[in-house]
Amino acid sequence: MVVRVWEVLDANETARSAYLRILSRPTRREVAQNAICLLLWLETTMGFDILRNVATMAPDDISLARIVFEANALCTYVLHGYYELPPPFEGFPGITALCGGGRLIEYRFFRFHRDLVARGVTMIRDTVAALVFNDNLHAMLRRFEDDSNSLLIPNPVPAPELMAPFIITTTTPPEDSRTVFVAFPEYHPLSSLDIKDYFERTLGFGHCIERIAMERPCARQSAKHGVVVFRSAELRDEAMHGEAAVFFRVDGRDMWVQPYMPPY
């Protein structure tokens, strides 16, 4: 099935509205685009419904200013590694609140998963976001919609640029579609062996895990994040019981597991 450019523009109308709302603050385009790319990654791959809220915020809302600052900081950090992040004790209150709290969206999550997040954000920046930020294409789409609603122009035809196929030339690594994020309380950490035994022995899935990587925290800290790569996407979905996120009890300790849904 061929997806046309106009269909992608239409499907991402909310992202466009959020982008224009951020620009109206006013905000530099680079900052606004960084913020939207990071928020699009969170919404597309993590399942948060957040851009709709950003699009309806007042331009002078302090919460909007905070979200833009945090999202730009995170996007710049994961892509380039040089932007000064907010202190770990402060975290990202604006984005955390936008995501409804949650167990994953915090400083150490982005530090540990930086390479994976960078791949996803880059993919979004070079594909969907490039259309979201394209003023000319959106002007063409508005003209076509106006013509379609006009009685003076029968059977209007979209501009060729709108009818062009939406082509993605690069994809994320196959293992991304077999990956889950795991998180647990720092005061009750789990080891990679704990997690492997739980899925393969306790739950009875057998030899289902390809690899596990655990966070290596700073001194006087315990790991609280990990990533599990299953041997197939089907095994991952089976272990997750088809759910978007699952809370497990591993030997009396809490473990939050959420699949990573790569953008493409």
Image: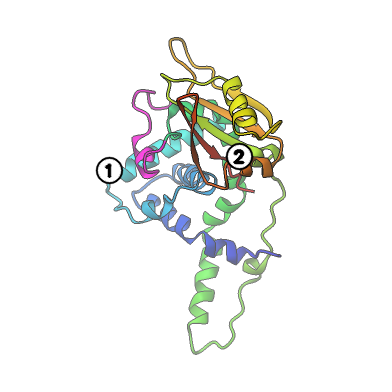
Q: Tally the numbered discs.
A: 2
Label 1: state its secondary structure: helix
Say which label, 1 or 2, has the lower sequence index: 1
Query: In x, y percent, where is residue 29?
Result: 46, 46
What's the image's color scheme?
rainbow
Q: Residue 237, relative to residue 78: is it above or below?
A: below
State the residue in front, 106 or 79. Answer: 106
* 87 lies left or right of 144: left
Q: Residue 168, relative to residue 179: is it above or below?
A: below
Three-letter residue code for mark 1: Ile
Circle 2 packing at 10 Å, graded few (<14), some (14-19), many (20+), is some
Residue 105 located within the stretch drawn in magenta: no
Query: In x, y percent, where is residue 210?
Result: 70, 30
Residue 83 visible somewhere in the drawing: no
Using the rendered view, name the quadrant where residue 213 is placed.
top right
The residue that disc 1 covers is 62
What are the residue bounds of the magenta stretch?
83-102
Query: In x, y percent, where is residue 235?
Result: 67, 41
The tag on residue 239 is 2
* 151 lies left or right of 1: left
Using the rendered view, name the quadrant where residue 192 is placed.
top right
Query: In x, y percent, where is residue 20?
Result: 41, 55
Three-letter residue code for mark 2: Ala
The tag on residue 83 is none
At horizontal 64% and vertical 48% (from top left) the residue drawn is 264
At horizontal 50% and vertical 89% (from top left) the residue drawn is 152
Q: Nearer the viewer, mark 1 or mark 2?
A: 2
Label 2: state its secondary structure: helix
Using the rendered view, name the quadrant where residue 123 is placed.
top right
